[in-house]
């Protein structure tokens, strides 16, 4: 079975934040982690339209 991996800019930003603040990883280590993720996953850019659409979907509940 083939899988399609997608990761968002928001998720990568949060990962970097945890790696820096909690784990105290070096820049090089974080860069290596990001490169490994981006080799296997497509990047989904969270933009203002994404945010507004998410808010709209949430309001329909």
Image (cartoon, grey):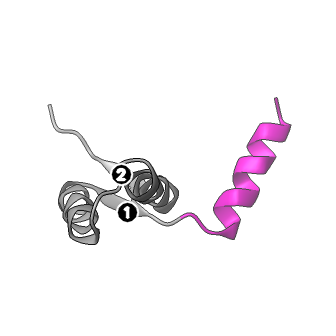
Residue 13 drawn at (x, y percent) = 47, 61
Residue 40 drawn at (x, y percent) = 19, 55
Residue 22 drawn at (x, y percent) = 43, 48
Q: Is residue 9 left or right of residue 29?
A: right
Residue 4 drawn at (x, y percent) = 27, 46
Q: Which residue is mark 1?
A: 43
Q: Which residue is mark 2?
A: 6
Disc ID at residue 14: none
Closest to the observer, 30 or 53? 30
Up-down: is 59 above or below 42? above
Q: Callout 1: few (<14), some (14-19), or many (20+) C-alpha neighbours within 10 Å?
A: some
Span highlighted in magenta in the image? 46-61
Identity of the residue drawn at 49% across and 54% down? 14
Identity of the residue drawn at 72% across and 54% down? 53
Q: Is residue 50 magenta?
A: yes
Closest to the observer, 24 or 35? 24
């Amino acid at each position: 079975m083939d899988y399609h991996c997608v990761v968002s800019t928001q998720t990568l930003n949060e990962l970097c934040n945890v790696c820096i603040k909690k784990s105290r990883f070096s820049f090089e280590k974080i860069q290596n982690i990001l490169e490994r993720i981006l080799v296997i996953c497509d990047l989904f850019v969270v933009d203002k339209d994404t945010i507004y659409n998410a808010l709209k979907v949430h309001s329909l509940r």
